Image (cartoon, helix red, strand yellow):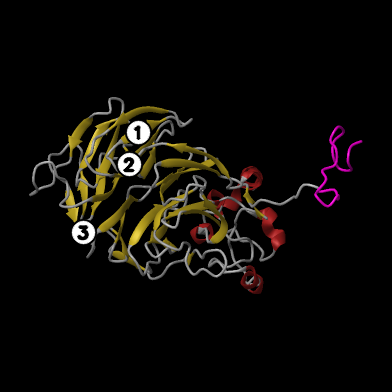
C-alpha cells in the first residue's frame, strides 16, 4: 500500500526511529524575467505612451506585479543597479574564479578558475550544473564572439582555445609566451585581439588561428607593445580600433592597419588594470591601481574604491551606468552623470561590508541587465539582483535592516525574487 502523499507503488520511507521520514522540501532562490518581459510587451501594445513617461512603483510588495525589465524603465538608470544579494556559488574544487561570462541566451553563466576548469551555473536558480577541465594551466580570460557562436579562453601558458556553444573544444593556438590576460573580437568576428603578460598585443585571424599583426609600440624593442605586462585589451564596438591597458601605467589606442599606436594615454599614476569601451563607442573607461576610474574625453574621475580597481563593466541597456570591483572586495555602481560618489554598492550576505572577502577579478551583467555576477579570489561567484519595491538602492546588510527601511519609497523596478 502506498504511503500517504506518495504515488502508488512507492512504500513509505522509514527512518531509524520507525517513523515515516518524508522528503524535505525547500525553496530555492529564483529570479525569472518571463512575467516582467511579457508585461512590458503587453504595455507597449496597449499603452505605448508609457515608455515616454516616468515609471515608478509603490513602496509595497504588492507592486511586484507592476515590475518591468531594465529595457522597460529607460527613464531611471539607477533603478538597474543590482545591489541585492541573491546567491553565493562555490565550486567543489576550491580555486580562485578569475573570469566569467554569460551564455549569449542568458540561461547559464560560465566561470573560469585558476585550476583550469569551466563551471556552469544556472541563470535562473543559480545552482551548479556542470564542470569541465578546459585547460591544464590557470584560466584568465573568456570571450564570446559577437555572433554568440564561439567561445575563446586564454590560460597562463599563452594558449587560446576555441569552444562551440556545447563546450566542445575544436581548436587550440599558442600566440603568446606569457599568460593571456584578455581576448576581444572585432565587430565582424573575422579577427580577435589578445593581450598578454609578455607585453604584446596581437591580432589573430579567427578562421586560421594565425597571428596577423603584432602591435609594435613606439620607442620599444622589437616585439613589444608595452613596456610591461598587458593587463587588458578590448576592440571598439564598431570601428577598427583597439584599446589596451598595461602595468607600465599607460593605456594605448591602436589601429590594426597602422605601424604604430594611434595614441598613448597617461591618465593614471599607477598600473592600468582595465579598459572598457562605452557601448556606443563614445568614451573609454579605465581603471587603475591608483584606486581611480577615469572616463576619457570627459575629464571625469570616479573616486570611491579604497584598493586598486580590478574589474569594470558597462550596463547592457543603460549607457550611463557601469559597475566596478576592486582588490578590497567592493563592488560599486556609478553613473557617468554623477562621478562624485557611487550610486550604490553591494554588501555581502550577513554583516559583510563588501561584496567579497578578497579581490574581485570580474563583474559581468546579464544580457538583459537585471542581474550582475561577480567573480573573486575568495573562490566564490556571487549573483546580485535589483532591489524589490520599497527597498532602497543601497542594499541592507541583513533582513532586519531591510524591514526597518522598507518604508522608504523608491522608484526601482526589479524582477521578483522568490525565496
Q: Decide: marks 1, 2 in contact (CB < 8 A)?
A: yes
Residue 169 in picture, x, y percent from top left:
40, 29
Q: Residues within 10 Å of mark 2 (few under 14, many from 20)?
A: many
Using the image, tell me which numbered label, if any, was put on residue 161: 1
The quarter of the image holding the N terminus is top right
Determine the main secondary structure of the stretch shown in magenta: loop
Q: Is residue 41 left or right of residue 155?
A: right
Which of labels 2 and 3 is toward the front? 2
Q: Could you give the CA–CA distance between mark 1 and mark 2, rounded to whole angstroms?
A: 9 Å
Q: Say above or below: 123 vs 392.
A: above
Which residue ends up furthest to the bottom in the rendered image? Answer: 404
Query: Which residue: 88% across, 41% down?
Result: 3
Return the residue nearer the eye: 19 or 325: 19
x, y percentage for residue 394? 53, 67
Question: Callout 2: helix, strand or loop?
Answer: strand
Q: Over which residues does the magenta segment extend?
A: 1-21
Q: Quarter of the image containing the C terminus?
A: bottom right
Residue linked to disc 3? 249
Count the labels in the image.
3
Question: Element type at marker 3?
Answer: loop
First in sequence: mark 3 vs mark 1:
1
The answer to if 15 sits in the magenta stretch is: yes
> Alpha-carbon distance for marks 3 and 1?
29 Å
Amino acid at each position: 500500500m502506498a504511503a500517504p502523499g506518495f504515488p502508488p507503488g512507492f512504500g513509505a520511507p522509514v527512518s531509524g526511529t520507525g517513523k515515516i521520514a518524508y522528503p524535505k522540501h525547500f525553496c530555492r532562490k529564483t529570479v525569472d524575467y518571463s512575467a516582467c518581459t511579457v508585461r512590458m510587451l503587453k504595455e507597449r501594445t496597449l499603452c505605448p505612451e508609457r515608455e515616454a513617461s516616468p515609471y515608478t512603483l509603490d513602496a509595497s510588495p504588492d507592486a511586484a506585479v507592476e515590475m518591468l525589465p531594465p529595457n522597460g524603465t529607460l527613464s531611471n538608470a539607477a533603478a538597474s543597479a543590482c545591489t541585492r544579494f541573491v546567491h553565493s556559488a562555490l565550486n567543489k574544487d576550491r580555486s580562485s574564479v578569475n573570469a566569467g561570462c554569460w551564455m549569449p541566451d542568458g540561461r547559464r553563466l560560465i566561470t573560469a578558475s585558476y585550476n583550469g576548469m569551466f563551471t556552469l551555473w544556472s541563470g535562473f536558480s543559480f545552482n551548479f550544473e556542470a564542470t569541465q577541465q578546459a585547460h591544464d594551466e590557470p584560466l584568465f580570460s573568456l570571450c564570446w564572439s559577437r555572433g554568440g557562436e564561439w567561445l575563446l579562453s586564454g590560460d597562463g601558458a599563452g594558449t587560446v582555445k576555441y569552444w562551440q556553444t556545447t563546450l566542445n573544444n575544436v581548436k587550440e593556438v599558442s600566440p603568446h609566451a606569457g599568460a593571456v590576460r584578455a581576448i576581444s573580437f572585432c565587430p565582424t568576428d573575422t579577427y580577435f585581439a589578445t593581450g598578454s603578460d609578455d607585453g604584446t598585443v596581437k591580432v589573430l585571424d579567427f578562421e586560421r588561428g594565425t597571428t596577423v599583426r603584432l602591435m609594435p609600440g613606439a620607442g620599444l624593442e622589437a616585439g613589444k607593445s608595452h613596456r610591461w605586462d598587458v593587463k587588458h585589451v578590448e576592440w571598439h564596438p564598431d570601428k577598427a580600433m583597439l584599446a589596451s591597458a598595461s602595468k607600465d601605467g599607460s593605456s594605448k589606442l591602436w589601429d590594426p592597419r597602422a605601424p604604430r599606436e594611434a595614441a598613448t594615454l597617461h591618465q593614471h599614476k599607477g598600473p592600468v588594470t582595465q579598459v572598457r569601451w562605452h557601448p556606443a563607442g563614445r568614451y573609454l573607461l579605465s581603471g587603475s591601481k591608483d584606486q581611480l576610474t577615469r572616463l576619457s574625453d570627459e575629464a571625469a574621475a570616479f573616486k570611491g574604491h579604497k584598493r586598486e580597481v580590478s574589474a569594470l563593466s558597462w550596463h547592457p541597456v543603460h549607457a550611463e551606468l557601469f559597475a566596478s570591483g576592486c582588490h578590497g572586495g567592493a563592488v560599486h555602481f556609478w553613473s557617468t552623470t554623477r562621478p562624485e560618489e557611487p550610486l550604490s554598492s553591494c554588501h555581502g550576505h550577513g554583516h559583510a561590508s563588501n561584496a567579497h572577502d578578497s579581490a574581485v577579478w570580474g563583474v559581468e551583467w546579464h544580457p538583459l541587465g537585471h542581474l550582475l555576477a561577480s567573480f573573486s579570489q575568495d573562490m566564490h561567484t556571487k549573483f546580485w539582483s535589483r532591489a524589490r519595491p520599497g527597498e532602497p538602492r543601497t542594499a541592507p546588510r541583513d533582513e532586519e535592516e531591510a524591514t526597518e527601511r522598507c518604508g522608504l519609497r523608491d522608484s526601482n523596478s526589479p524582477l521578483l525574487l522568490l525565496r
